[in-house]
Amino acid sequence: MSTIPLLLLLPSLSFGMELALDTKPAKPGEKSFLILAVQGAEDVGELYFKLSYDWENLKLLGVKPGPLVAGLGEDAIFAMNPEDFPDRSGRFRFDIVVAGGFSGEGPAMMFEFDISDSAEGFVEVNIEEARAVDTSLKSIPVGLHNGGFVLPVSVEEEQVALPPRPALLPNFPNPFNEGTWIPFQVPRTCRVRIKIYNILGQVVRDMDLGVVKGGYYMGVGRAVYWDGRDDDGRLLGSGVYLIKFRGGKFEQVRKALILR
């Protein structure tokens, strides 16, 4: 099992609390929820985060607590800015203060979006920043996982047009339990290889796709499927993993989150 220096892969990786937005397939013109999931929350007294989204293709319709936060009842106080919907700036802030703190993992917030009829490809929703403190006001490191909606690429574009640049897109669903799709794009024929690393920098899964034609590999059945297992077929545990994509000489790394 090979290892590489983890900080060379992803300097921003933290080992405290994790926030992860869904990445999920969707269709233009429909309404859909994105979930903000939490892992590793322990005695969190306050959680602040700022979201941004593609306001030309998305309209924010509403926000409601997920099961993790809804179960706190009157112990949780919410503050949001702006308070009016739809938000036309593409950004908003959210603050959760919990008397006595909260711990655990799972869906914390749910954001409902209306997706434009003209949207296609990948429409991003990002966590721009986040801060957390425990009940003694001690800072908690927060790792961030951005997400969004994977939308169908037109048949004409998928068959004729080539992407302008190579890219590794966020896997979906993310966080995931049973398996996840890893979408990517390459502008020309090249060898593609995807490696999965654990937080120790060890390769747990190596997927060599061989020579791949230039194009978009985004949807279910086109993207690469990872079943959440290592090369020996063993289920991997909950936690943060790194997806390293190599297409020709291009390399990119993204984070994935398993929640068992």
Image (cartoon, rainbow, N blue to C red):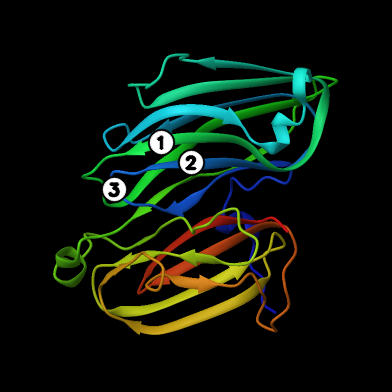
The residue that label 1 is drawn on is: 113
Q: Against 236, is 255 above or below?
A: above
SS at badge 2: strand
- Residue neighbourhood size for the residue with mark 1, other residues' Cα within 10 Å, grouped as few (<14), some (14–19), many (≥20): many
Looking at the picture, how far across and down is residue 61, in whole percent? 41, 28
| Left-right relation of 138 to 189 | right
Q: Identify the amino acid type marked 3.
A: Pro
Q: Which residue is pictured at 46% across the width and 55% down the height?
A: 170
The residue that label 3 is drawn on is: 28
Q: What is the CA distance from the residue labelled 2 to the residue labelled 3?
A: 14 Å
SS at badge 3: loop
The residue that label 2 is drawn on is: 33
Q: Residue 82 carries which label?
A: none
Q: Against 178, is 238 above or below?
A: above
Q: Against 107, is 243 above or below?
A: below
Looking at the picture, how far across and down is residue 232, in whole percent? 70, 84
Q: Identify the amino acid type marked 1.
A: Phe
Front one among 72 and 251: 72
Q: What is the CA distance from the residue labelled 3 to the residue labelled 1?
A: 11 Å
N-terminal of the pair, mark 3 or mark 1, is: 3
Residue 43 seen in the current view: no
**Are dots 2 and 1 in contact, CB under 8 Å?**
yes
Quadrant containing the C terminus is bottom right
Looking at the picture, how far across and down is residue 50, in whole percent? 52, 27
Q: Which residue is pictured at 56% across the width and 22% down the height?
A: 94
Tell how many labels: 3
- Residue neighbourhood size for the residue with mark 2, other residues' Cα within 10 Å, grouped as few (<14), some (14–19), many (≥20): many
Residue 46 seen in the current view: yes
SS at badge 1: strand
Q: Identify the amino acid type marked 2.
A: Phe
N-terminal of the pair, mark 2 or mark 3, is: 3
Looking at the picture, how far across and down is residue 29, in whole percent? 28, 43
